[in-house]
Image: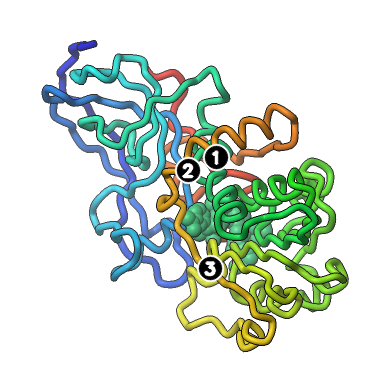
């Protein structure tokens, strides 16, 4: 359906002003207001309601080659977002449709509809398409089901276990009759993992003197799958306790993202040989062909009350840099989201 507003729109956006050295700070970002020209034939205008902040965005703040292109200085950042179509000159979309796109960090965006997904707001709260039902939930599922070949009875260790990906890993593994040990950095996160996610044992890595010793105590029969979100000392501790022929799923290594010097751990990588371990990295977007299966699998787990999730919500686009920086301070329990506005007109 075609609707016409076709007026210029003022849109606030968050731009990168400098590349962080070490931990990102507020001075790396600035808010700016730009004017968008009217949409052309075939285009839609979307007003953002929610946006995601993700650790991988730190990699895009650096210059140089990566699996995603770097953010440009003086340009708005990008990332997963959910918004409402406020004007459409594209037959596939109508005014009022809720859509998933990749132009977060701004109020409004225009698109020809390519790569934009229509969402069903009746299935789950709309913002869960950025978390449990979205990229982060799918990352957990792909890592366990496609990379690690999860089997009942496995012992799984997951780091950053109370975060967006980690909390899904922990519960998918529990729902598949695995023993799950997690690590997190705050007592309320530890409590949530025990009481709400129902995992078997949790380490507070910030108060533990020796991560490897503690892991050995909590997984006395060894680890079959390590789902690595953290790298560094966590990876080293996991290697110490991996069972022969185990699998290390290299999902992320957040402890290294702000490092100025190369990380000192893991110092025991040679054990990968004697233990005949498999270490495999993956990028979730390479597995989009499995998306429907992920949605079916996860929906069944949600319906049978085997999956719960938390969201840490930051209000206001102007506070998005704080939400992003908070990922590296452990501020979030579950998925970190920015609520840009309520009902879009
Ligand atoms: N491969 C892929 O396709 C893919 C896709 C999505 C995400 N990822 C990766 O998955 C990991 C988790 O992402 P997410 O979106 O779910 O983030 P998240 O876990 O929700 O948030 C980050 C958490 O990491 C922990 N953390 C931060 N700095 C740390 C450090 N130095 N040492 C130990 N823990 C630290 C904090 O929790 P604590 O309080 O526990 O410290 C923080 O809350 C990241 O490494 C990310 O890059 C990979």
Q: In this rendering, is residue 188 above or below 113?
A: below
* Gap in angstroms between the C-alphas marked 1 and 2: 6 Å
Query: Do residues under tags 1 and 2 come within 8 Å of each other at their CB atoms?
Result: yes
Q: Pointer 3: residues within 10 angstroms few (<14), some, or many (20+)?
A: few
Q: In this rendering, is residue 161 above or below 294?
A: below
Residue pictured at 49% horizontal, 44% vertical: 135
* Gap in angstroms between the C-alphas marked 2 and 3: 18 Å
Snapshot quadrant of residue 110? top left
Query: Do residues under tags 3 and 1 come within 8 Å of each other at their CB atoms?
Result: no
Disc 2 C-beta below 8 A from ligand 1: no
Which residue is denoted by mark 2 in the rendering? 290
* Gap in angstroms between the C-alphas marked 3 and 1: 20 Å
Marked residue nearer the N-terminal end (2 or 3): 3
Which residue is denoted by mark 3 in the rendering? 280
Q: Circle 2 sits in a helix, a strand or a loop, which is it?
A: helix
Q: Circle 3 sits in a helix, a strand or a loop, which is it?
A: strand
Snapshot quadrant of residue 301? top right
Residue pictured at 57% horizontal, 69% vertical: 255
Residue pictured at 40% horizontal, 22% vertical: 98
Relative side of 89 to 126, left or right:
left
């Amino acid at each position: 359906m075609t609707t016409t507003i076709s007026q210029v729109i003022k849109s606030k956006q968050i731009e990168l002003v400098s590349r962080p050295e070490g931990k990102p700070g507020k001075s790396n970002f600035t808010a700016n207001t730009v004017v968008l020209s009217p949409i052309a034939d075939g285009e839609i205008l979307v007003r953002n309601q929610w946006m995601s902040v993700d650790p991988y965005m730190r990699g895009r703040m650096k210059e140089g080659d990566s699996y995603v292109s770097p953010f440009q200085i003086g340009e708005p950042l990008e990332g997963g977002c959910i918004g409402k179509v406020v004007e459409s000159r594209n037959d596939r979309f109508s005014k009022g449709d809720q859509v998933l796109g990749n132009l977060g960090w701004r109020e409004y965006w225009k698109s020809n509809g390519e790569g934009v997904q229509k969402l069903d707001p009746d299935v789950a709260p709309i913002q869960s398409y950025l978390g449990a039902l979205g990229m982060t939930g799918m990352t957990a599922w792909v890592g366990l089901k496609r990379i690690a070949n999860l089997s009942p009875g496995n012992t799984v260790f997951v780091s950053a276990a109370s975060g967006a990906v980690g909390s899904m890993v922990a519960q998918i593994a529990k729902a598949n009759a695995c023993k799950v040990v997690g690590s997190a950095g705050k007592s309320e996160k530890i409590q949530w993992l025990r009481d709400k996610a129902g995992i078997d044992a949790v380490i507070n890595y910030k108060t533990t003197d020796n991560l490897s010793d503690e892991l050995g105590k909590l997984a006395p029969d060894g680890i079959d799958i390590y789902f690595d979100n953290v790298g560094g000392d966590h990876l080293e501790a996991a290697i110490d306790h991996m069972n022969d022929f185990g699998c290390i799923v290299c999902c992320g290594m957040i402890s290294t993202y702000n490092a100025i010097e190369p990380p000192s751990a893991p110092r025991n990588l040679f054990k990968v040989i004697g233990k005949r371990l498999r270490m495999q990295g993956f990028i979730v977007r390479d597995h989009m062909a499995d998306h429907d299966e992920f949605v079916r699998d996860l929906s069944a787990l949600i319906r049978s009350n085997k999956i719960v999730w938390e969201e840490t919500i930051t209000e206001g686009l102007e506070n998005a840099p704080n939400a992003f920086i908070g990922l590296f301070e452990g501020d979030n329990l579950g998925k970190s989201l920015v609520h840009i506005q309520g009902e879009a007109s």
